[in-house]
């Protein structure tokens, strides 16, 4: 017994005629007769009395009719509910720390203003963890500042970013405002934890220029690093957008480095086999168009 059987049965009951029911359903009349016969065989009950060319529904048929209407109505409700979820749904979005701190809240706020029926489930962590969550299908989309390392993930750039060297106002570099890259040799740096996109870029650029450096501390929070630098504990290289307030308040100073830059691209990433729902597609397009 299937929903198709019940649909045919219901139309036959409503039309009280198999030929008319077949026309309404746009199927052949023998298919209608076969479906009713299969139902009767399934329940081992007569659903209709056939007297001449007329059909008369039996007591068993009347009983089944009430269930058939209820079952088909529930099926239609389920279809409508699933379609609504498919079109509006939920999007699980992860962001690496710099993105999560600086732009994530505005990105989500602006999206919800025009897509109020879509639920966004945000998560903020370092790039490596966001990548693992995508691979485990714990996220639908990741907004990351580091490189994607898995070949199972697709990445699309959506925003440029730059890391800058910052010190406290009393640091010797602050008085200069501009230094040569060689002056960074063996300096103490506060860095993010392993798996951070910011740390990965910093270490790779320093290595490519042959500049050795010392670890002055490891933090899993950009805010903690900024506070430590402002207190004069060491220096750091950090996203320019994340220190704008501290620069304005003169708590930190940006130092220009000759012949050295830490430019990068933010990317949105997703599993190459991910089914892109309409809601997810909308959020992706919104991200690609986002203007901070």
Image (spheres, grey):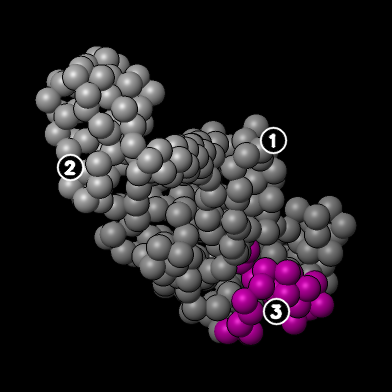
Considering only vertical position in the picture, is 103 above or below 202?
above
Q: Which residues are magenta?
A: 215-239
In this rendering, position of residue 209 left or right of residue 218:
left
Q: Is residue 29 visible?
A: yes
| Secondary structure type for disc 2 | helix
Q: Residue 222: x percent and y percent?
A: 67, 69
Disc 2 crowd rating (10 Å Cα; few below 14, some 14-19, many 20+) is: some
Circle on res. 234: 3
Disc 1 crowd rating (10 Å Cα; few below 14, some 14-19, many 20+) is: few
Q: Residue furthest front?
A: 51
Q: Residue 168: x percent and y percent?
A: 78, 70
Q: Residue 47: x percent and y percent?
A: 28, 38
Residue identified by numbered label 1: 113
Q: Quadrant of the C terminus?
A: top right
Q: CA distance from mark 2 to mark 3?
A: 81 Å
Disc 3 crowd rating (10 Å Cα; few below 14, some 14-19, many 20+) is: many
| Secondary structure type for disc 3 | loop
Marks 1 and 2: which is nearer the front?
2
Classify residue 116 by image quadrant. top right
Nearest the viewer among 267 and 179 is 267
Q: Is residue 281 magenta?
A: no
| Secondary structure type for disc 1 | helix
Q: Residue at x 85, y 59 (%)?
A: 250
Q: Residue at x 12, y 25 (%)?
A: 30
Q: CA distance from mark 1 to mark 2?
A: 52 Å
Whether pointer 2 and pointer 3 mark residues with C-beta atoms closer than 8 Å, the reply is no
Marks 3 and 1: which is nearer the front?
1
Residue identified by numbered label 2: 38
């Amino acid at each position: 017994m299937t929903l198709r059987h019940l649909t045919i049965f219901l139309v036959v009951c409503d039309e009280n005629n198999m030929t008319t029911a077949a026309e309404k359903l746009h199927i052949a009349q023998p298919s209608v007769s076969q479906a009713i016969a299969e139902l009767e065989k399934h329940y081992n009950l007569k659903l209709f009395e056939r007297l001449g060319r007329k059909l008369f529904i039996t007591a068993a048929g009347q009983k089944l009719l009430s269930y058939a209407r209820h079952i088909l109505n529930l099926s239609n409700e389920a279809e409508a509910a699933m379609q609504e979820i498919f079109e509006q749904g939920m999007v699980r979005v992860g962001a690496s720390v710099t993105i999560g701190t600086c732009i994530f809240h505005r990105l989500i706020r602006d999206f919800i203003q025009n897509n109020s029926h879509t639920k966004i489930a945000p998560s903020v962590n370092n790039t490596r963890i966001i990548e693992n969550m995508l691979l485990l299908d714990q996220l639908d989309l990741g907004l990351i500042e580091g490189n994607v390392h898995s070949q199972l993930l697709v990445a699309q750039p959506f925003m440029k970013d730059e890391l800058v060297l910052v010190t406290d106002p009393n640091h010797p570099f602050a008085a200069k405002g501009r230094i040569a890259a060689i002056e960074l040799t063996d300096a103490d740096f506060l860095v993010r934890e392993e798996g951070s996109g910011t740390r990965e870029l910093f270490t790779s650029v320093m290595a490519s220029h042959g500049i050795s450096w010392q670890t002055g501390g490891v933090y899993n929070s950009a805010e903690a690093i900024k506070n430590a630098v402002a207190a004069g504990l060491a220096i750091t290289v950090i996203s320019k957008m994340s220190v704008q307030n501290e620069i304005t308040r003169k708590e930190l100073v940006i130092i220009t480095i000759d012949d050295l830059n830490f430019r990068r691209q933010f990317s949105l990433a997703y599993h190459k086999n991910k089914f892109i729902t309409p809601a997810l597609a909308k959020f992706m397009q919104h991200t690609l168009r986002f203007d901070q």
